[in-house]
Image (tube, rainbow, N blue to C red):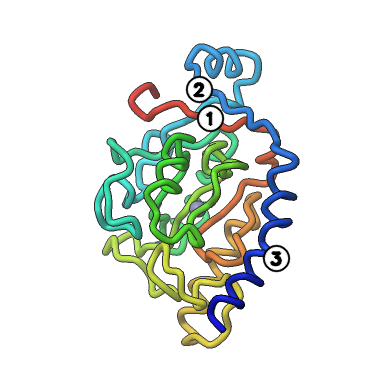
Amino acid sequence: MKISLSLILWLFSGPLLFAQKKAPAPLKVVSSFAVYKNSCRQNPDKQLIELKKAIPDLQLDIRYATKNNFMKQIMYPQARAFARKPVVQQLQKVQDELRKKGLGLRIYDAYRPYAITVAFYQKASDKHFVANPTKGSRHNRGCAIDLSLINLKTGKELPMPTPYDSFAPQAAADYAELPVSVIRNRNLLIRTMQAHGFRVLKNEWWHYDFVGWQNYELLDIPFKDL
Ligand SMILES: [Zn+2]
């Protein structure tokens, strides 16, 4: 029974694999610092800006620079966060609005060099939960941010549906069976980000894409060069 079932699965997966291999889209990744710098001269919006320099009262908790992440490994050599210029300008507006309520942003991740996305995929034991590097991620474009809300006075995170990078169903941006206060916090974050040009990812309440990310190339410039 076991053998025949795997045989059936094999027969079905064969044509699927073939179909996937048929059209390999060439991926354009900017890995030369000179090419990146030149793109910034032509369009200053392409510049990667360090978040903490632009928004000093941001809280950084760059999990991939520690072992406190789903990979349980240090993936970033430096605990820094960057994004393209307009992304940072919009985040500034988000922080300004939150500050009036005594709140602020905690940043878990922002621009991610492409080589790190590849390393994630190679090192992950369960490929299901890790982005396939064949398309590149919006984080690689400097146009995605992972974040949460904090109380500016205490520095503590407001109660949210799940911890960062949780694979639980509760991480979905519209998950409804949660305490009212948690839903209120999550929806305040979603609404404020949305009002300033970001869209939440369906399965991750903490992940936001900048509207217009298509205009920015995938990058593989390491933090130390920035
Ligand atoms: Zn993300």
Circle nearer the N terminus (1, 3): 3
Reading the image, the residue beneath label 3 is 12
Reading the image, the residue beneath label 1 is 219
Q: Secondary structure at mark 3?
A: helix
Q: Nearer the viewer, mark 3 or mark 2?
A: 3
Say whether marks 2 and 1 touch (CB < 8 Å): yes
Q: Amino acid at mark 2?
A: Ser
Q: Nearer the viewer, residue 175 or 16?
A: 16
Count neighbours of disc 1 (C-alpha within 10 A) and say few if under 14, some if 14 to 19, many if 20 or more. Answer: many
Q: Secondary structure at mark 1?
A: strand
Q: Is 223 above or below relative to 19?
A: above
Inter-mark Cα distance, 2 to 1 = 6 Å
Count neighbours of disc 2 (C-alpha within 10 A) and say few if under 14, some if 14 to 19, many if 20 or more. Answer: some
Determine the residue positioned at 71% across, 49% down: 18
Q: Is 172 above or below relative to 71?
A: below
Q: Nearer the viewer, residue 206 or 134?
A: 134
Ligand 1 within 8 A of label 3's CB? no
Point out the image quarter for the N terminus: bottom right
Say whether marks 1 and 3 touch (CB < 8 Å): no
Q: Secondary structure at mark 2?
A: loop
Name the quadrant containing residue 104.
bottom left
Reading the image, the residue beneath label 2 is 31
Q: Amino acid at mark 1?
A: Leu
What is the number of the mark on residue 89? none
In the displayed structure image, the side of residue 64 where residue 90 appears, left or right? right
Q: Nearer the viewer, mark 1 or mark 3?
A: 3
Q: Position of residue 96 (x, y in %)?
A: 49, 50
In the displayed structure image, the side of residue 113 where residue 42 appears, left or right? right
Q: Amino acid at mark 3?
A: Phe
Q: Nearer the viewer, residue 13 or 37?
A: 13
Determine the residue positioned at 28% across, 36% down: 77
Ligand 1 within 8 A of label 1's CB? no
